[in-house]
Structure formats: structure tokens, C-alpha cells
Image (tube, rainbow, N blue to C red):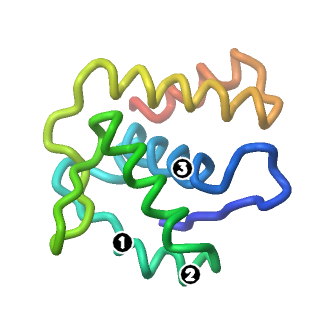
């Protein structure tokens, strides 16, 4: 999965990263039990601070999307509850608006992804 961040965007880098990972989970690109890349590797590949990645992972943990285990890294949570799904949908809608997509286009993209 390709992760890209925009330092010029108004959203902090950790929020951008968390939003991309949320979207990947919601789209099924990341499934329950999948391991996320080690935070050090993500930080190095994106040329950002390790703590930025850790903050994004912690935010996803707090939303119930990711489980963090010392020494084992981060994995996609086995059970996604309604609150986590609502958070992912909210992020999707916010990102769609930020990109200037109209609601019909966003809905069409979601329907296409569900097929």
C-alpha cells in the first residue's frame, strides 16, 4: 500500500496517515489480523518523525481499528465495532470533501468498492 503525506495540507501529518490507514481498512485493503508496517519503517519511508507514525497508530488503536502490542507491532483489529466503522466513514466523507468530490461521486465510489 502506497502512503503519501502532504506537508502543506492543513491536517497534521499523523491525521493524514491515520486517515489513509482507516480508508485502507474500510476498503478491505487491510484485513483483520494484517500487520501494519513497523513504525520505524513507515517513518523512514515517508521521511517523518517516528513519533508522528506512533501517534497515528495510537489514534487508530483508540478508535478500535488497530491493536498495538509491544514487541509485536500493530495489527488490524479482529473485530471492528460500529464506532470504528462510523469513524472510518466520517474520515472518508471529510477526505472526499477536501478533494472537492460531490456526494454523488463519493456514493458511487463506495458502491463500486462494495461490489
- Badge 2 local density, few (<14 within 10 Å), some, or many (20+)? few
Q: Residue at x 31, y 44 (%)?
A: 61
Q: Answer yes or no: do the residues labelled 2 and 1 have beta carbons within 8 Å?
A: yes
Residue 92 at x, y percent in the picture:
57, 31
Q: Report, in whole angstroms, how far the alpha carbon at label 2 lies from the one at label 3.
A: 15 Å
Asked which quadrant contains residue 97, the reply is: top right
The residue carrying mark 3 is 20
Asked which quadrant contains residue 83, the reply is: top left
Nearer-N-terminus badge (2/3): 3
The residue carrying mark 1 is 37
The residue carrying mark 2 is 45
Which residue in the rendered view is the most extreme toward the front? 51
Image quadrant in which the C terminus is located = top left
Q: Does residue 79 appear to the left or right of 46 in the view shown?
A: left
Identify the element where label 3 is drawn: helix
Q: Does residue 61 appear to the left or right of 68 in the view shown?
A: right
- Badge 3 local density, few (<14 within 10 Å), some, or many (20+)? many
Q: Report, in whole angstroms, how far the alpha carbon at label 2 lies from the one at label 1.
A: 10 Å
Residue 7 at x, y percent in the picture:
78, 61
Residue 1 at x, y percent in the picture:
47, 65
Amino acid at each position: 500500500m502506497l502512503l503519501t503525506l502532504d506537508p502543506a495540507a492543513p491536517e497534521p501529518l499523523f491525521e493524514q496517515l491515520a486517515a489513509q490507514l482507516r480508508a485502507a481498512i474500510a476498503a478491505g485493503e487491510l484485513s483483520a489480523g494484517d500487520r501494519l508496517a513497523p513504525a520505524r519503517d513507515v517513518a523512514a519511508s515517508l521521511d517523518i518523525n517516528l513519533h508522528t507514525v506512533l501517534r497515528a497508530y495510537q489514534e487508530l488503536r483508540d478508535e478500535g481499528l488497530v491493536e498495538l502490542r509491544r514487541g509485536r507491532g500493530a495489527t488490524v483489529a479482529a473485530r471492528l465495532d460500529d464506532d470504528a466503522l462510523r469513524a472510518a466513514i466520517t474520515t472518508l466523507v471529510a477526505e472526499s470533501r477536501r478533494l472537492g468530490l460531490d456526494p454523488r461521486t463519493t456514493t458511487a465510489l463506495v458502491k463500486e468498492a462494495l461490489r
